[in-house]
Image (cartoon, helix red, strand yellow):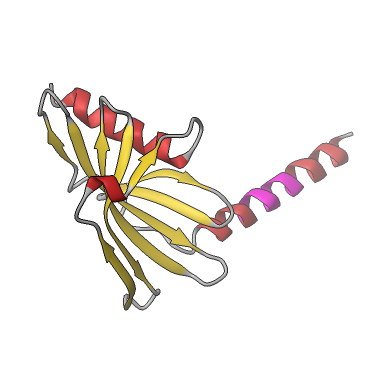
Amino acid sequence: MKKTISRIIGTLLLLLSFNMLCFAEFQPDSSRWVWIDSNSVTGTWYDSWSVSVNRNYSKPTVNLWILQYHNAPEESISQTLFTVDIKGKKLYLLEAHDYNLQGKMTKSLEWDKYDDNEIRIVPGSLGEAIYYVAMGYYLKSH
């Protein structure tokens, strides 16, 4: 009985340590970047240093940078600036930049108009998680 329990605990510890090693490949500065979500391919963080709240009462918004690390098919990093419409419950892309792991920019996009890049918030999605981060900052600013 003790031998079986020891084997189970040993196996669990081995699996947990392997899982931690898989996600330890890329870790942004934890004093700045706050984890939002991850799966086996992508890790997502937001930049707590650059969040800005616009308390326009007709259309309150929050701007925040999102960092994503992708480990498949190739390792890469993307940084995206979102504007979150708090009352309208929508996200808008303002800028998106992709980098390789050496820090070289591989793609850069910018949008001038909100209408071109509206993202509806799907329940249970990363977009919803980003919305709730923005909502938290908005509520703290009141």
Measured from the top left, where is residue 100 in percent x and y? 39, 74
Please give the count of numbered marks on the rendered protein: 0
User: Front-most of 109 and 8?
Assistant: 109
Q: Residue at x 44, y 62 (%)?
A: 26
Look at the image and give the residue range highlighted in magenta: 10-17
User: Front-most of 2 and 23?
Assistant: 23
Measured from the top left, where is residue 42 in percent x and y? 50, 55
Measured from the top left, where is residue 19 in percent x and y? 61, 53
Image quarter where the C terminus lies is top left
| Residue 140, quarter of picture | top left
Q: Residue at x 20, y 28 (%)?
A: 138
Magenta part, dominant SS? helix
Q: Is residue 114 left or right of residue 4?
A: left
Q: Residue at x 32, y 78 (%)?
A: 104
Q: Is residue 52 left or right of residue 27?
A: left
Per the image, is 16 magenta? Answer: yes
Q: Is residue 100 left or right of residue 2?
A: left
Q: Residue at x 56, y 53 (%)?
A: 20
Measured from the top left, where is residue 1 in percent x and y? 89, 34
